[in-house]
Image (cartoon, helix red, strand yellow):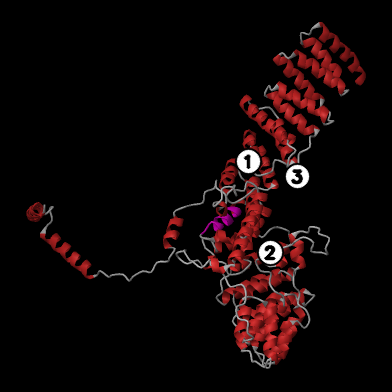
Amino acid sequence: MAASGRHVGHYMQRNGRFLTNNLEQLWSHRSFGWTPSLRQTAVEANKESTENIVIPRKKTWSKVAVLEALASTVGRDPTAFNYKFQDDSYLSPGTLTEFKLYSLSQESGRTAAKFFINSNPKFFTEDFAEPHIPCLMPETVSPLIEEVSEEALKERINLRRVKAAVDLYDQLLQAGTTVSMKTTHDLLDLICLYCDKNPVQEGDTEAEDVEAVEGRNKRKVKLREYLDSQECTWKENNSAERIFNVLPERDAHCYAALIRGMVKHGAYAKAFSMYTDLLNERLTADVHVFNALILAAPHVQDKYSERWNLIEDLLKQMNQQKVQPNLLTFNCVLKSLRLCGSLGKAKALHTLNEMMAVGIAPSLASFEHILVLFHRSGSSGQPPTDLLQDILSEIKGTSFTCQDPEDDRFFSFAMKVCLDAKDMELGYKVQSLAEVGNNWRLLGDPYLQGIYYGRFFSLLCLMEHIDVILKWYKQLVPSLYYPSFQSCKGLLQALDADNRLDLLPQLWKDFRSLGHDKRPQLVEELLTLMAREKHSPEVQERFAECALDIKGVYDDERGRTSLQWNATSLTHITSLLLRANKTQQAWEMLQLFTSNNRVPPDELLKNFLSVCHSSGSVQTAVDLVQLSAAFCLPATAELAKQTLADFKLTEEQRAVVSELASTGESFD
């Protein structure tokens, strides 16, 4: 076996050497028409390229680089629901209400799981995630240091236990222990941030019951009312002020913490008084203090001119104290100018020019403040489309990152300007900017996103052709937008304007899936459009099937709300069924007039009689005349005479109709 292997290896080595020699000879005889000069040039170029090779340095890739590369190859699926619901196919919302409910349910489950993990960290010690995901691991939620020490105080500050930290600080002072200035700074920051109250944390019993907040009557209140009742206001001589007053030395950070806390929690006058004390101590405020005071300025002055003078004075003091303003400084100025009436419009562009003069690029929040100022202060009442046009031209193709907490308000307000002006071209420019890079992240939370896309879709329904509207409709619904009742009504009006009523049955299916099938105004609008005029037999057949589906919605009494029959809806559905020659279903609809105490119009009964004549339904015609007589309608005599003239009646039927004809004359 080994001998045979050696023979095979020797054979391969000998033949391989022979093949190599022959290829070298063949290559030397084949010059491909190259001249000696060309061969020399190629040799020199090859030599030069060999000498210029630079080995690149080792590149360190991100741990999620592969995931980012894969994500860049996949686009958004417009037919799929939001990505947050892809883990559970059952949680696939079809309506805006379900979207809110499932989102809150998912967040509630995530919060409960986090609380369980943090409460039982000993069961979750293994870390299987690669790369490491800190938020999936247990967090320390209870103090571990029981002794009275500065380390224990730091621990409680990190855990955001405000009351426990204040109590421990008092114990340290009573024991004569000196607390470092850095720890004191952190404690003051914590107290001022949460206004001397413990923040509501995940799993706390304070947030368990939203019922029976006022008293003990166990009545339910809305979550917003509960949250409003929990808002903090700055109290006189709270823990922050008490600790500040007993400090042996007070630096600028101590003053800054109190000033920012007072502004945050509504004590604007006290904030300016504290700032005066800071100046008297010959200390310098930082940029964050000035930003807070600029926001508080409109709340301590009554006249618009006095508010601006105070803001301008603060900016001059910044210059005197050599405090460099930042982006938030100018955004605070613009936000305060929104409370200065018409004066704000005059000072807004000047502020923007000063902003650019110091080399600070505006953020989306800056532009939103400008738009709001000019939108409110416009003398003619017209939206500031020219200003928005200039802004979009300036930032076209720019991918923004969030630099201000209010950056997410720009797109929704910009689209409001476009909708008010009915400027479709400008609306497309806003949408194009939202699609650049990660700008979609700045559309805001689901509520603001719904406002933005609702305004954009309303603008489309007002200004665009129906084919363009339906193209955007398919792109936005349901992955990004759940149309509201008003948007659906605008879509129906757009179909009517472009005479594309044949699409109504398909839209009705979408309305049902979106949960708008219980909207009386929307359903009646849809029925009115379908019954207004006659169409081709194919379209009428689809209309009749849609009408029967709508009838099923009226008959369905499940759920909190149900549709109530009225004469208009009964008439429209009956007319649609008659046009599709569904006589039996139309007759059943006529019976609903009686059971719901509604009176059918004369025109409907005449049309019904014509359909009976076309189909040869003699008995149905006689029953129709009897139904008209039961309602004591003036058209009874005319219907009876027409039945006697157009139908071949039996003697019994003729006697009945003749009697109704004579009786019907008394109804006129």
Q: Which residues are magenta?
A: 426-436
What numbered label is drawn on residue 263?
none
Q: Which residue is mark 1?
A: 510
CA gap, disc 3 to disc 1?
Answer: 21 Å
Q: Residue at x 60, y 54 (%)?
A: 426
Asked whether the residues under the numbered discs 3 and 2 touch, taking CB atoms below 8 Å apart as contact, a structural biologist would say no
**Image-quadrant location for residue 230:** bottom right
What type of secondary structure mainly makes up the magenta span? helix
At 69% from the left and 90% from the top, the residue drawn is: 173
Which quarter of the picture shows residue 434?
Answer: bottom right
Q: Earlier in the sequence, mark 3 or mark 1?
A: 1
Q: Looking at the picture, tell me which residue is in the foreground, 539 or 255.
A: 255
418 within the magenta span:
no
Where is mark 2, residue-wise?
372
Q: Real-space Cα distance between discs 1 and 2?
A: 36 Å
Image position, residue 392 (x, y; %):
57, 61
Is 432 a magenta residue? yes
Residue type beneath disc 2: Val
Please name the amino acid that badge 3 sits on.
Arg
- Give the image location of residue 504, x and y in percent: 65, 36
Disc 3 target residue? 560
Q: Amino acid at mark 1?
A: Asp
Q: Position of residue 510 (x, y in %)?
A: 63, 41
- Residue that appears at 63% across and 38% down: 509
Q: Give the answer, above or below, for where 564 lies relative to 81.
A: above
